[in-house]
Image: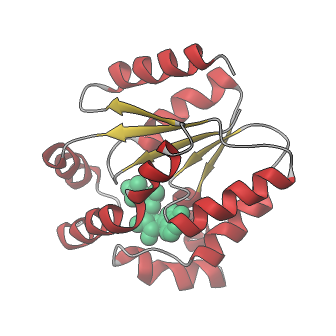
Amino acid sequence: MNIIFLGAPGSGKGTQSERIIDKYGLVHLSTGDMLRAEIAAASELGLAAKSIMDAGGLVSDEIVIGMIEKRLTEKGALFDGFPRTIAQAEALDKLLAEKGQKIDCAIHLDVGKDELMNRLLGRGRADDNEATIANRLAVYQTQTAPLIDFYRAQGKVHTVVGNGTIEETSAKITAILDTLKL
Ligand code: ADP
């Protein structure tokens, strides 16, 4: 099965991914983690991405689609932080179709704005300062939130209110995935 985690910065996509991948035998594909690894390795791609990420913008569709394409396997995947634009979502559908696969389910992690701000400000990552966070939340609203309707039109969206504890949220997610019996 192939699953997408959709949600604003700070909604818990990365944290929940860690808890879900082992249980369902999925490969974790986080474009944010991939980009941070490129920055740590001081690669050309990392250098190009760093200033964009520090400003809270989106790295180009071409770059992130290429990173995902390289890592797709026959095994099911959990996509975390990808797709973030309609163009990325369309590219992903196409790449999976070429492998005879598809997205089975999009989990929308829904967390209120105050809680998102608290979590991001408490996290201390390089791009977690107030100005960058404001921009990332705005970019999420304009570029990424439309994906909820994109996947809703395919009947794949399951919304999980993620304001509670890590355990409460992962219990809600596993309940959904278990019901789908993929
Ligand atoms: P968060 O969910 O907290 O925003 P991520 O680790 O998913 O954190 O992303 C961090 C940054 O990496 C984003 O703000 C963006 O600049 C870049 N990035 C990650 N994934 C993508 C993507 N799919 N498309 C464009 N940029 C991305």
Instruction: Write the residue at 34% across / 62% down.
Output: 140
- Classify 178 as above or below 56: above
On-image quarter of the N terminus: top right
- Left of 87 or right of it: where is 1? right
- Classify 61 as above or below 99: below
- Classify 43 as above or below 178: below
Instruction: Write the residue at 55% across / 73% down.
Output: 39
- Residue 28 percent location from the top left of the image: 64, 43
Instruction: Write the residue at 65% across / 77% down.
Output: 62
One can see residue 54 in this view: yes
On-image quarter of the C terminus: top right
- Classify 68 as above or below 178: below
- Left of 136 or right of it: where is 43? right
Asked which quadrant contains residue 58, the reply is: bottom left
Instruction: Name the foreground residue: 105 vs 13.
Output: 105
- Residue 27 percent location from the top left of the image: 70, 40
Determine the residue located farthest toward the front in the rendered image. Answer: 153
